[in-house]
């Protein structure tokens, strides 16, 4: 179905969606999406991890990553839960299932899935037109970035998450898709795990043309291997943007900033 057809369908069935009034978000990225949809008024509780959007600063907390306060959650009487699977442990996810509270599970692996899930969350909130509008704007921005940074031969990029031990992102992780938007290719895109541990030898073998890390000391350490293309070409670059770690609408502009880091010449 084309995007316009999807928009029409969402609007047509909006009257069939049950109106929700009390939403609990179980991931910061999902809380952020609700705010981006102009629907913070529906939230009655959030799971905490880092700073909150200003609109949510006074909302009750239902715990932190992996430490859901079930009693507090139930006291809020939610009629919709927004869940990212990684934010709640397996045992508590089973508990949530037994409560029979309507739940929307979001776990996007690429940016197109993210925009589709934003539309779906808006529908769950009973405000589909807001999701259609926001997703359309985000898709246009993504198309513009892809065209601007497109390369006939993508740059080989190693995205370093941590150094001891050495971790990166796999091909199913949404950051890997953000690299593609920037005209780059994750050198470990063939690995299925979202955050696989790799060896220095494996990085050397794949010979990245750009190495990205969140810490200057981690980048400096790669200078011990001058044969790596990224070192030889002086493409050791800092990425400190935490927006890449939160798959909400703001991640599209975080991707734009990533593109500028990878290819400042563009």
Image (cartoon, rainbow, N blue to C red):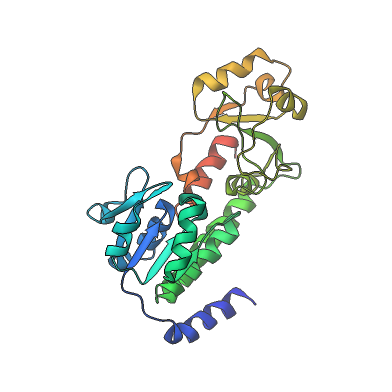
| In the displayed structure image, the side of residue 34 where residue 147 appears, left or right | right
| In the displayed structure image, the side of residue 108 where residue 47 appears, left or right | left
Q: Look at 46% across and 52% down and name the residue there.
A: 88
In front here: 82 or 256? 82
In front here: 106 or 89? 89
Residue 155 sits in quarter? top right
Q: Measured along the vertical axis of the image, is residue 129 above or below residue 62?
A: below
Residue 20 appears at what percent x and percent y? 35, 75
| In the displayed structure image, the side of residue 117 where residue 69 appears, left or right | left
In front here: 181 or 177? 177
Residue 113 sits in quarter? bottom right
Q: Quadrant of the N terminus?
A: bottom right
Is residue 248 in view? no
Residue 96 appears at what percent x and percent y? 44, 62
Residue pushed farthest left? 58
Count of numbered labels shown in the rendering: 0
Residue 258 appears at what percent x and percent y? 54, 41
Is residue 227 in view? yes
Residue 38 appears at what percent x and percent y? 34, 66
């Amino acid at each position: 179905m084309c995007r316009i057809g999807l928009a029409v369908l969402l609007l047509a069935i909006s009257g069939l969606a049950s109106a929700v009034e009390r939403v609990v978000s179980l991931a910061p990225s999902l809380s952020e999406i609700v705010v981006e949809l102009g629907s913070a008024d529906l939230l009655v509780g959030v799971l905490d991890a880092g700073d909150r959007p200003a609109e949510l600063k006074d909302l009750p907390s239902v715990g932190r990553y992996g430490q859901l306060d079930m009693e507090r959650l139930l006291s809020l009487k939610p009629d919709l839960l927004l869940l990212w699977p990684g934010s709640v442990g397996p045992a508590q996810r089973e508990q949530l299932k037994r409560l029979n509270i309507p739940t929307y599970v979001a776990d996007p692996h690429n940016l197109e899935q993210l925009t589709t899930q934003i539309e779906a969350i808006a529908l769950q909130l009973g405000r589909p037109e807001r999701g259609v509008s926001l997703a359309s704007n985000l898709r246009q921005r993504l198309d513009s970035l892809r065209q601007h940074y497109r390369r006939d031969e993508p740059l080989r990029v190693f995205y370093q998450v941590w150094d001891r031990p050495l971790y990166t992102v796999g091909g199913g992780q949404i950051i890997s898709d953000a690299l593609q938007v920037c005209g780059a290719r994750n050198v470990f895109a063939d690995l299925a795990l979202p955050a696989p541990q790799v060896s220095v030898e494996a990085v050397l073998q794949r010979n990245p043309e750009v190495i990205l890390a969140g810490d200057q000391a981690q980048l400096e350490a790669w200078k011990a291997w001058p044969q790596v293309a990224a070192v030889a070409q002086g493409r050791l670059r800092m990425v400190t943007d935490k927006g890449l770690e939160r798959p909400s609408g703001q991640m599209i502009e975080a991707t734009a900033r990533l593109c500028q880091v990878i290819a400042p010449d563009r």
